Image (spheres, grey):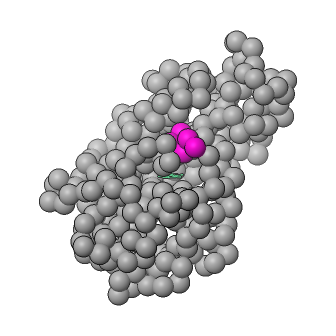
Amino acid sequence: MSRIAYVNGRYLPLAAAQIRVEDRGFLFGDGIYEVVYVNRGRFVDAEKHLARLERSLREVRIAMPVGRPALEGILREIVERNRIRDSGLIYIQITRGAARREHVFPQAGTRPTLVVTARALASFPKDVDTWATGIVTGPDQRWARCDIKTVNLLPNVLAKQAAKEAGAFEMALVDEAGMVTECASSNIWIVDAAGRLRTRPLGHDILPGCTRAALAELLGGERLTLEERAFSLDDLRAAREVFITSATSFVRPITRIDGATVGEGEVGPVTRQLFAAFSRHVQGGLPNAA
Ligand code: PLP
């Protein structure tokens, strides 16, 4: 079955779907996006993702092309049309539209471009030990507003490719002060050498991850506390446990950094507990309305 894409009001086979050559997303990276994980018809953390999408649009001054209820309808439809029953992701991209190439905003009334696609994923990981992976570290070469989920992902692309070529899944990005910001496409957490669960506080230098926020909300029920305090590359290397979070990594244990093992090289107890808690968060609940 061919995949189906939504583009500006029409559902089309992916291979036939088109945007214009002068689309500003293509020319300038002038657009924003979201990725939502869908599990058995349920959109995980949908409210958080849609709120962040609206915030990203406000920050870059692009108008929402359709209202929230219409967008939610498109998301439901795209999942249905792509026959995603078990596990999948929905990709939403909104750009400032197509217009003659000039850096300044196009004239009022230019319609933003809305593209929505979806694809099936492997089922939610059942086993936390086999879900564990490795990362490398490298410089954070991104811009000064990483809190906005824009499609300008060139530094992230290069970081992720460097990780892949080094046999790792992700790159932890390190700022000029030697502090870890986040990874190329995920947030990063540690249980530090003193046993404290830490992740970097929100600010302009990291994306406010929806998984990060959802997991933070689960901590009380797990009798764990979080210190939102930046940690250095040295802290990362000395950590007892390390894990990353994102809509499609969920809670993913990191057991190797730059080829060296984290602790004993096994998934630690806090990561194990949080993977289980997040797994319940994803799998639990009824199919939701969004
Ligand atoms: N940080 C970056 C740079 C990302 O690209 C992502 C997700 O793609 C995240 C963090 C995690 O965000 P979320 O949990 O909302 O997927």
Which quadrant would the C terminus be assigned to in this image? top left
- The picture places residue 41, in percent across and down from the top left corner, at 41, 46
Q: Position of residue 12 (x, y in %)?
A: 70, 37
Residue depicted at x 48% and y 30%? 55
Q: How many numbered marks appear?
A: 0
Left or right: 263 as drawn, with respect to 177: left
- Residue at image location 30% in from the left, 69% down from the top: 191
Q: Where in the figure is residue 169, as x and y percent of width and height?
A: 55, 70
Q: Give the residue displayed 63% in from the left and 72% down from the top.
A: 164
Residue closest to the far top: 108
From the viewer's side, name the closer residue of 71 and 200. Answer: 200
The question of residue 276 being in magenta is answered with no
Above or below residue 264? Residue 140 is: above
| Residue 179 placement (x, y as % from top left) | 47, 61
Left or right? Give the position of 100 relative to 150: right
User: What's drawn in magenta, residue-wise?
Assistant: 144-149
**Residue at point 56% right, 23% down?**
64
Nearer to me, 143 or 210: 143
- Image vertical order of residue 246 relative to residue 193, above or below: above
Q: Viewer-proximal residue, 48 or 46?
A: 48
Name of the residue lying farthest toward the bottom: 264
Let me know if residue 192 appears in the view: yes
**Residue 245 in view in this figure:** no
Q: Is residue 186 above or below residue 70?
A: below
Judge left or right: residue 212 versus residue 276: right
Q: Report which quarter residue 171 is drawn in.
A: bottom right
Which residue is most to the front?
A: 177
The answer to whether residue 20 is above or below residue 279 is: above
Q: Residue 239: which quarter of the image? A: bottom left
By secondary structure, the bulk of the magenta-drawn segment is best described as: loop
